[in-house]
Amino acid sequence: MNAQRAAAVSAMQGRVEEHLTSTLSDADCVAVCVAASLPRDRDDVFGVILNNNLCRLVAPRADSLAVLPEEWAVLFGKDSTFTNEESLTKLTADERFTTLIDSISTALRCSLTEAGAKAAWQRAPSRLSCYIALHTDSTEELVSHVLGGLVRADTRRLDDVRSTVEDEATDCMLLAMSVIALANCVV
C-alpha cells in the first residue's frame, strides 16, 4: 500500500508541478489536487494554499489537476494508512465540523451498521475525507471508497446533505483547513 500511496502522491506532484513555476511540498501538491476537486469552492481553497501568482496559474487548469477516484481510494480509502493524525484533533473537535459530521453520519446510518464501514468511520481522517467529498461532484463514489462501500439506501440521504451543503454558504476556511490537514495525513 505504501508503494501505491507514493505513486499516487508522485502523480499528483507531477501534475501540479507541470503547471507551476515553483516547487511545492508533497503535502501542498496533494492539497492542491484535492482543492481542484471542489468545483464550487476551489478558488477560495487555492487562495489559502497558494500565493496569488500560483493561484492564477493553477485555477484555469483545475479540472486536469483534480484527484482521480483511484488516487482518492489509495490515499483516503478504507484501507489507507495515515501518517500524521495529530493535526486533525483540533479540527475535528470544532463545532462547525462536528455538526456537519453528525449530518453525514445520520445520512449514512445503514452503511455505518456494516463492521468495516463503522471501523473506517471511527478514524478522524475518514470523517474528514467524507466531509470534503461532500464538496465534490463525485460524493457517492468518494464516500464509498472511504467506507469500503455504501449501502444504496443511504445515497438519497447523502445527496440531501450534499444539496444542503451546496445551498448554504461554504465555510471556506474550515474547508481549506480540512484539505490541508487531510493532505498532511497522507504524506
Image (cartoon, helix red, strand yellow):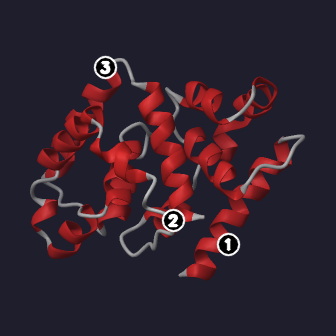
Picture disc at residue 167: 3
Label 1 sits on what residue type? Ala
Residue at position x 70%, y 58% in the image? 26
50 w.r.t. 87: above or below: above
Q: Residue at x 77, y 25 (%)?
A: 56
Label 1 to label 3: alpha-carbon separation: 36 Å
Q: Residue 50 carries which label?
A: none
Which is closer to the viewer, label 3 or label 2? 2
Q: Mark 2 points at which residue?
A: 75
Picture quadrant of residue 151: bottom left
Horizontal side of residue 117 vs 47, given as left or right: left
Disc 1 on helix, strand or loop?
helix
Q: Which amino acid does label 2 sit on?
A: Leu
| Left or right: 14 as drawn, with respect to 179 | right
- Classify residue 32 as left or right of residue 163: right
- Of the image marks 2 and 1, the number of the one nearer the N terminus: 1
